[in-house]
Image: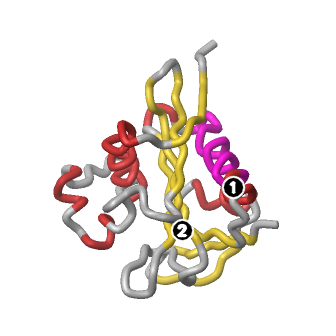
Amino acid sequence: MAARSILPITDDDLPFVQEMLCEAAFWRDGSDGPPIDEALSQPGLAVYVAGWGRPGDAGRVARIDGEPAGAVWVRRFHDEQHGYGDVDAATRELSMAVVKNHRGRGIGRRLTTAMLTQLRLDAVGQVSLSVENDNPAYARYESLGFVPWRTVDGATTMRRTLP
């Protein structure tokens, strides 16, 4: 049985988190997204990782036998700079991706659950995300209590209140 762990993101994990951002943005099988440097030159994507470590940033990396298999992270955005799943400045936005050959094994659910637990402990009141309507993760987010808030261009911003 493979040894699995979910640990906080460290500075050493940031290149992997950037890879996972590209996986999240270009998730379709057979889809070749641009190289990471090119993807991160797009302001709409760069906001998810640029200047990592500011107040409100938190994340986890899943590892299998020591190798990273997926990541989840949240950021707090402001009106002038925000992500696709923006609700308001008080709501953290969640991003998550799993390495292609580890998908379908429950890693995404475990990562998301771990992040929701951390946000509750940090007394965060609400979290949001953006997911394309045909992404298989949509159903997972619904099953974890996220509800649709608005839909634009085939993607839905979902939010979840945290007790």
Q: Are marks 1 and 2 in contact (CB under 8 Å)?
A: no
Whole-percent x, y for residue 62 in the image: 54, 35
Residue that label 1 marks: 116
Whole-percent x, y for residue 116 in the image: 69, 55
Q: Is residue 105 magenta?
A: yes
Tell whether 139 sits left or right of 29.
Answer: right
Secondary structure, mark 2, is: strand
Residue 117 against residue 46 in the figure, above or below = above
User: Of the residues shown, which amino acid type is indicated by label 1?
Assistant: Leu
Residue that label 2 marks: 93
Tell whether 138 sits left or right of 19.
Answer: right
Whole-percent x, y for residue 86 in the image: 51, 78
Report the magenta residues as a range.
Answer: 104-117
User: What quarter of the picture does the N terminus occupy?
Assistant: top right
How many numbered marks have been drawn onto this rendered protein structure? 2
Whole-percent x, y for residue 58 in the image: 53, 54
| Label 1 vs 2, first from the N-terminus | 2
User: What quarter of the picture does the C terminus occupy?
Assistant: bottom right
